[in-house]
Image (tube, rainbow, N blue to C red):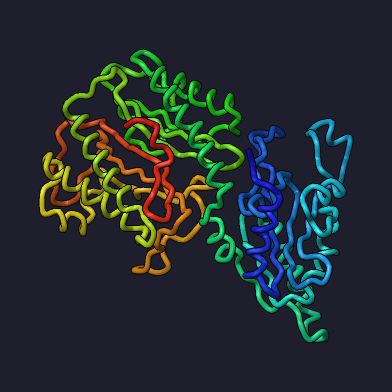
Amino acid sequence: MGIEQSEYRHRRSKLMEKIGQGTAIFRSAPIATMHNDVEYIYRQDSDFYYLTGFNEPDSIAVLAPHHSEHQYILFVQPKDPLKETWTGFFWGIEGAQESFGADAVYSIADFSKEIVQYLTKSERIYYHLGRDHSFNNQILSIWQSVLGGNARRGFGPVALEDTNHLLHPLRQQKTVAEIEMMRHAIGISVEAHKAAKDIAAPGRYEYEVQAAIENIFRSRGGMGPAYPSIVASGDNACTLHYIANDRQMLSGDLLLIDAGCCYGYYNGDLTRTFPVNGIMTPEQQAIYDIVLEAQLKAIEQVKPGVPYNQVHHKAVEVIVEGLVELGLLVGNREELIAKEAYKPFYMHNTGHWLGLDVHDVGSYKYSEDHWQSLQPNNIITVEPGIYISPKIVPVEGQGEVDQRWHGIGIRIEDDVLVNSFGCEVLSQSLEK
C-alpha cells in the first residue's frame, strides 16, 4: 500500500498551475540529533514528501513550470559507497532521476550554481522561510544575486512568496489513495487501542500499556507512533500532553490513552478513556456521559459547507450545559460560554486537520469572523474533553470544586472524513 508516482506527478502539476511563471523551492528536513553523534530516525519534511515521495535528507526539489526543458528538478546526495556502509542505501543522481520522475537531477553541492537558470526567467520565487535558517539565508542570498541582473535582462524574480498558501489547500483535500492510507493507519491504531484495553489492569504500569500499543504499530507495518503516546492514569489524565507514562495504575483510576499509528507518513489520532478496573464511579460516569454526548453532537455537525468552528461550538454548548447540571459551573449557559468560564475544565479546541502531519496543515479561518468551511475529503479529529485537575483554579464568579471530582480527566477522540453527504467516522470500530 502506498502512493503511486503518477499521483506525485499530479500533485506537482496542480501546484505548478498555481505557480505559473514562478519558481518554487522545497528543502528536505534536516537530520535531527538525539544526543552527541546519535541521530533520530529520519523523518522527511511533509511538504517535500507530498510533492516528491523522496525520503532522503540533504535534498532540494524545484518546480519551474516556465522553464523550456526542466519543470521538475531534484538536487540529491551523490552515491557514496563508503557512506552507505554506515548509513544505508542512497538513490544517488541517476537513481533519483530514473525512479522519481525528475526532468533533471543534480548533486546537492551544485545547488547554488544550477538554481540560477531556473530563476532568471521566473516572475517570483516561492519558498517557505522555515526552521533551516542556514538555507533560508542561502535562498535570500541567491535571490539578491539574481536581482542584481534583473535590470540588465529586463526580467527576473521581483518577489519572494510563501508556498504555504498555495500548497496547503491541496494537502487538505485528500485523494482516494491518501484516504486509503489514512484508513490503514487508523485501522492499526484501533487495533492497538483494543490491545491496550485488554492489558490495562490495576497494578500494571502505564509503560506496559504503551509497549503493547507500540508493538502493534510496528508489528503491523507502521512506522511507529504518530506522536508520543499518552497513557495517562488517575490525575495524569488532567495533563493534556502527559508522556512520562511511568505511573502504576490503581483500582478506581480512569486511564486516558491518546495514541495513533503512523503508516507511510499518514497518521491516526485516537483517544479513549476507560476505568482500569472496569467500573466507573458515579462521578466518573457523569463526566464521561457529558464528554460522550459532546463528541457525538459535535460529529453530527461535520458536513460539507459547515464552518470549522461550528464543531467546537456544539461541543462547548453540551459541556457547559452538563457542567451546569452537575453544579460544577453556575450561571446562564450563554453567559458562561461568552466569558469562557468552562476553560478551567475544557481548555483546548475540539479537533484539528489530520493527514501527513498529526496537526495537519491548512487554515482554520481567513479572518476573525470568517472561518474555513469543511469540504469533502477533509479529515479532522473530533476530541472534546473534561479535565478536573486537583490544581484547578476556577474563573471569577465560580466556586471551589468539590474534591470528589478531582483527578477526573476524560477525552474521547475519533478521526472523521468529510464526504459529499455528511461524514464517516473512520475509527468507528473502536468502542466508546
The quadrant in which the C terminus is found is top left
Q: Nearer the viewer, residue 329 or 9?
A: 9
Residue at 73%, 44% (x, y): give it. Answer: 56
Residue 70 in the image, given as x and y percentages of width and height: 81, 65
Image vertical order of residue 253 relative to residue 156, above or below:
above
Residue 389 in the image, given as x and y percentages of width and height: 27, 35
Residue 277 in the image, given as x and y percentages of width and height: 29, 17
Residue at 21%, 59% (x, y): give it. Answer: 338
The quadrant in which the N terminus is found is top right
Residue 156 in the image, given as x and y percentages of width and height: 75, 79
Q: Is residue 281 left or right of residue 27?
A: left
Residue at 61%, 57% (x, y): give it. Answer: 130
Q: Nearer the viewer, residue 199 or 78?
A: 199
Q: Is residue 129 left or right of residue 383?
A: right
Image vertical order of residue 263 relative to residue 307, above or below:
above
Corner quadrant of residue 231: top left
